[in-house]
Amino acid sequence: QKPMEIDKTYPSNEQLCFVHVGKAGGSTIGCSLGFSLHCSSQNQTVSEGMLPTLTAHVFHRAINDCVNDNRYYLFVVRDPLARLTSAFYYERPNIREE
């Protein structure tokens, strides 16, 4: 079976909506795209390039400025078990991860 071909072109008149998924690296990616999502001095630098320019909207908790006709979305995904473990220790900082 042939691998699926991925279309790497992107219409210049379209904008991306960044969907923040908790404990999946979303804050770091969001900060590098220019959104203020729990940014610290370590991850506050906005990256250069096409992606920060095109990503104009964000969906994060109560913030949703994505429009209904957005055709392109950017998600960061993570191994579900690693995400669950990370969320567990994030909520329980006094428990030491081994």
Image: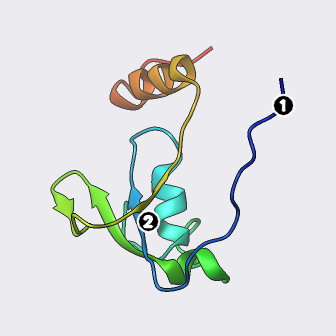
Return the residue found at the far front: 1
Q: In this view, does 58 lie to the left or right of 9?
A: left
The image quadrant of residue 36 is bottom left
User: Can residue 22 be seen in this snapshot?
Assistant: yes
Q: Which residue in the structure is indicated by mark 2?
A: 39
Mark 2 secondary-structure assignment: loop
Residue 69, horizontal then vertical, whole percent = 27, 67
Decide which of 29, 71 is in the foreground and name it.
71
- Nearest-to-viewer mark from 1 and 2: 1
How far apart marks 1 and 2 lie (CA) works out to: 41 Å
Mark 1 secondary-structure assignment: loop
The answer to whether 94 is drawn above or below residue 78 in the figure is above
Which label was assigned to residue 77? none
Hey, what amino acid is under mark 2? Cys
Q: Which residue in the structure is indicated by mark 1?
A: 2
Hey, what amino acid is under mark 1? Lys
User: Can residue 40 be seen in this snapshot?
Assistant: no
Decide which of 78, 1 is in the foreground and name it.
1
Return the residue found at the far left: 62
The answer to whether 64 is drawn above or below residue 12 in the figure is above
Which of the two discs, 1 and 2, labels the residue nearer the N terminus?
1
What residue is rendered at 53% in x and 16% in y?
81
The answer to whether 24 is drawn above or below residue 58 in the figure is above
Decide which of 3, 77 is in the foreground and name it.
3
What residue is rendered at 53% in x and 58% in y?
28
The C terminus - image quarter: top right
